[in-house]
Amino acid sequence: MDKEVTKIESDDTSSVEIKVLLFARARELTGVPDLTLKMPSGSTTQKCLDELVLKFPSLEEVRSCVVLALNEEYTTDSAIVQHRDELAIIPPISGG
């Protein structure tokens, strides 16, 4: 079975393409484990999150409490994404 890739594209001609990984509740809300996101060059991780919320409004539920990781390292919302970066959206995880 081929894996379907969801792409979100911006209209900007100077852009970067990143892979977004969605975990826990973010994955449940979007229905996808990962996707490719095309953003204007110089975009921050916060701008990427904003774009994801536009595409998946249900993410607003976890937006204020997610942790972001860029290339497997926790990061701030002001970090600049580069072409082929991997951005993880990690909501709080609870369980017993």
Image (cartoon, rainbow, N blue to C red):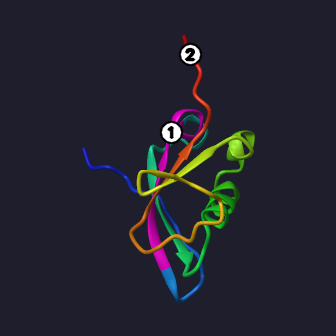
Q: Residue furthest top?
A: 96
Reply above or below: 50 against 10: above
Task: Residue at 70% x, 40% y: name it.
Answer: 65
Per the image, the residue denoted by label 1 is 23
In terms of image quadrants, where is residue 67? top right
Q: How many marks?
A: 2
Q: Position of residue 74 (x, y in %)?
A: 52, 50
Pinpoint residue 75: horizontal percent, then vertical percent.
56, 55
Q: Which residues are magenta?
A: 16-27
Query: What amino acid is at disc 2?
Result: Gly
Decide which of 70, 83 is in the foreground and name it.
70
Tell me where residue 43 sits by quadrant: bottom right
Residue 11 lies, in percent from the top left, at 60, 82
Residue topped by disc 2: 95
Q: Residue at x 56, y 34 (%)?
A: 28
Front residue of 31 and 41: 41
Q: Residue at x 55, y 47 (%)?
A: 89
Which quadrant holds the C terminus?
Answer: top right
Q: Nearer the viewer, mark 1 or mark 2?
A: 2
Distance of label 1 from label 2 (alpha carbons): 14 Å
Q: Residue furthest left?
A: 1
Please, what is the three-letter code of the amino acid marked with disc 1?
A: Phe
